[in-house]
Amino acid sequence: VIAGARKMRLLILDWIGAVIDGNSTREFEIEAEANELSPEDRALFMEITRGVFREWGILSATLLKYAPKAPRTKVRHLIFLSAYSLLFLDRIPAYAIFSEAKILGEKINLSEPEVKFVHGVLKKFEAEKVPLLAAHEAAYPDDFLKILEQATGGDIEKVQNALLEMHEESRLVGYVLPGMKPLKKYDSIESDVAPDAILLDTNALKNDPAVRVQGEASQ
């Protein structure tokens, strides 16, 4: 039996592949499976899928910097899942992310050199986390935008469309990044558990770099 958290991450990898491949049938099947996860794993599934797609551009451009020769799709998606966790999910220890990436690589039948490649790229993400996040929050110069366009290829439109479809009828819970000023004032969800949580909308998700999505609010 696959542990819940690992099953959740395998579903994420499968889901990303289905979206990029345009396989809507498989996409819906995976979402149905994700609905059977525990509330905690379901919330993390939503957070990571939305987060990876929101940060697809910076993840792609950074991977291009570290690995000019593009890895195959399964390798790329494992790197994106793990790198997103390293950069944006501080509550998950780095050692746990590296360990899980190795196990996931074996689960999805990556070769030993590919598993080592994933580890090496993730070490670079980890080593440059601070400058990467600083560049991420700054206004991108024109040369970086050209790199971004080259790195994302035709996938970025699929990613953006998927984000909009996921959220067009959702009430999104999120937060403002420390030290960042949001484009507007967002409503609080008035939660004792997460007093800083705010209610977002699709426009905020797409256009406000100061906010991050945590999950979906109860209807």
Image: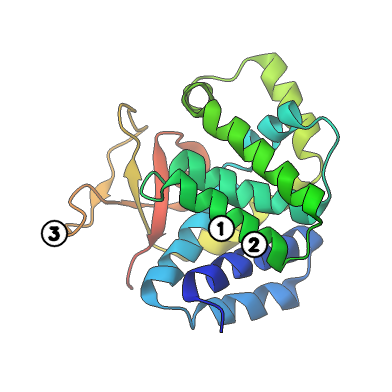
The residue that disc 1 covers is: 100
Seen in the image, is 180 located left or right of residue 32? left
Compared with 28, 192 (above or below) is: above
Instruction: Decide which of tag 3 and tag 2 comes sooner along the chain.
Output: 2
* Count of marks placed on residues: 3
Disc 2 element: helix
For disc 1, the neighbor class at 10 Å (few under 14, some 14 to 19, many from 20) is some
**Cβ–Cβ below 8 Å for labels 2 and 1?**
yes
| Residue found 27% across the figure and 39% down from its top | 185
| Residue found 62% across the figure and 68% down from its top | 10
Disc 1 element: helix
Instruction: Decide which of tag 1 and tag 3 comes sooner along the chain.
Output: 1
Q: Quadrant of residue 144?
A: top right
Label 1, label 3: how many angstroms apart (C-alpha)? 32 Å
For disc 3, the neighbor class at 10 Å (few under 14, some 14 to 19, many from 20) is few
Q: Quadrant of residue 8?
A: bottom right
Q: Position of residue 70 (x, y in %)?
A: 83, 39
The residue that disc 2 covers is: 104
Compared with 85, 165 (above or below) is: below
Disc 3 element: loop
For disc 2, the neighbor class at 10 Å (few under 14, some 14 to 19, many from 20) is some
Seen in the image, is 157 located left or right of residue 69? left
Q: Amino acid at mark 3?
A: Asp
Q: Amino acid at mark 1?
A: Glu
**Foreground mark, 1 or 3?**
1
Q: Nearer the viewer, residue 142 or 83?
A: 83
The residue that disc 3 covers is: 192
